[in-house]
Amino acid sequence: MDNFPEKYPLDQFAIYGKLDDFSIKIQEMLSFISIQR
C-alpha cells in the first residue's frame, strides 16, 4: 500500500503527458489546414 501513493502520480503524469502530445499534434494539424486555406 505504501507504493501506491508514489506510483499513482507517475501514472497520472504519464497520462497527462500523452494528452499534451495529442493536443499539440491536433493544434499543429489545425494550424496546417488553416495555412493551406
Image: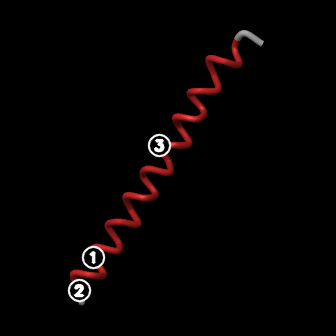
User: In the figure, is residue 29 to the left or right of 15?
Assistant: left
In the rendered image, which quarter contains the C terminus? bottom left
Q: Is residue 17 above or below residue 8?
A: below
Report the residue at 53% width, 37% height from top: 14
Counting residues from the N terminus, which is met first, the one under dot 3 or under dot 1? 3
Residue 12's spot in the image, x, y percent?
58, 35
Residue ID for mark 2: 36
Q: Amino acid at mark 3?
A: Gly
Of the image marks 2 and 3, the number of the one nearer the N terminus = 3
Pointer 3: what residue? 17
Element on which disc 3 rests: helix
Query: Residue 32: x percent and y percent?
Result: 27, 76
Distance from Cα at disc 2 to Cα at disc 3: 29 Å
Residue 32 numbered tag? 1
- Whether pointer 2 and pointer 1 mark residues with C-beta atoms closer than 8 Å, the reply is yes
For label 1, the SS is helix
Crowding at dot 1, Cα within 10 Å, few <14 / some 14-19 / many 20+, comes out as few
Q: Are marks 3 and 1 in contact (CB under 8 Å)?
A: no
Residue 15 shown left or right of residue 5 in the figure: left
Colouring style:
secondary structure
Q: Is residue 4 above or below residue 11?
A: above
Residue at position x 39%, y 62% from top?
25
Q: CA distance from mark 2 to mark 1?
A: 6 Å
Q: Is residue 23 above or below residue 29?
A: above
Q: Judge from the rendering whether residue 13 lies leftward or rightward of residue 33; answer left or right.
A: right
Tell me the kind of residue under disc 2. Gln
Label 2, residues with CA under 10 Å away: few <14, some 14-19, many ≥20: few
Q: Type of residue at label 1?
A: Phe
Residue that lies at the very extreme toward the bottom in this rendered image: 37
Residue 16 drawn at (x, y percent): 51, 43
